[in-house]
Amino acid sequence: MKKQIIAAAFITVAMLAGCGGGGGSTAPTATVAGKVADGYLVDAVVFMDKNGNYTLDAGEPNTVTDANGGYTLTVDPADIGKYPIVALAIAGTTIDMDTKTHVLRSYPLSLPKESVTGTVSSDSNFLSPISTQLRELMESGTSMPDAMAQLRTRLSAGTNIMADYIASQNEPMHTAARNMAALMGAQSNLMFRNYSGTDHLDVTRYRNMMGAMFSNMSTVRNGMPLPQMATNISNIPAGLPYQNTSPFMNGMTWGKSMMGGK
């Protein structure tokens, strides 16, 4: 089952032969454990993204979330805090425990490398749409303290925005994350592009989408539709499969001007 799920995450059959946890190395290892949510996501693929392309590649530590949305990666201790963690919710495979049904469209979530820790706690390594937005703010050059402060303001959140909002029963944060995930899934057909028979995330469009969401966070938080988002994103020139340099601030600019965001 695990190999079938990973195959659905757009990797080749040849890669699957070497997949699973951290491989058979006898070198010292450490674990990175946490949960993945909009609602807790079951059978989502989680991996340490060593080349920053949001795609599971051969040799990257990986696993599949359990019935509680939990995951544990076996990694090189030196890699903790060095690389981000990515989770892929896969259409027709991953189950959102909010609805107890399969997600209808694929979308990625991530955790900035600065937040990855080997410490085990209820909030450690929690991947959500909110941690994803934090990472993309930081990828634009914003410092982690500034990015967290901006997100708190946009989300009207006075709490730890990296906390497990389900475990803490923080319904406003949970609702905001649910709305963000819905928008991310709705743009799936524009986010993933096929190269050489394999789907890859178009980082150019993805980061502009995240910029638009940030610019309109008050609207997203309240669950109001952004009817022009798909049209605007489709007009953004497509990037390369591994392009990782699209300026996030561009998305914020067009998000404000074309969708009336605050």
Image (tube, helix red, strand yellow):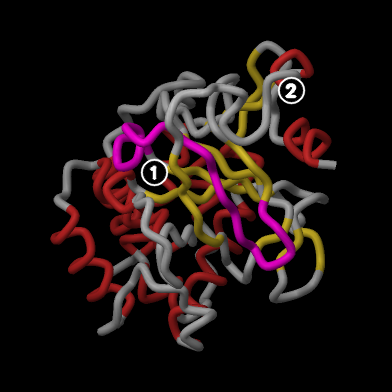
Q: Quadrant of the C terminus?
A: bottom left
Provide the residue designation for mark 1: 208
Q: Measuring from the top left, give residue 20's x and y in whole percent.
A: 67, 32
Q: Is residue 124 above or below residue 32?
A: below
Q: Measuring from the top left, give residue 254's x and y in whole percent.
A: 32, 49
Q: Is residue 236 visible?
A: no
Does 43 sit left or right of 220 as displayed? right
Residue range in magenta is 65-83
Provide the residue designation for mark 2: 16
Q: Quadrant of residue 57?
A: top right
Along the line of sight, the residue nearer the viewer: 87 or 48:
48
Identified at 36% across, 36% down, the residue is 77
Identified at 19% across, 55% down, the residue is 144
Q: Is residue 71 visible?
A: yes
The residues tagged by marks 2 and 1 sit, at their Cα atoms, a distance apart of 32 Å
N-terminal of the pair, mark 2 or mark 1, is: 2
Tag 1: amino acid: Asn
Identified at 26% across, 74% down, the residue is 152
Q: Is residue 16 above or below residue 174?
A: above
Identified at 39% across, 43% down, the residue is 208
Contact (CB < 8 A) between labels 2 and 1? Answer: no
Does 7 sit left or right of 130 as displayed? right
- Residue 66 highlighted magenta (yes or no): yes
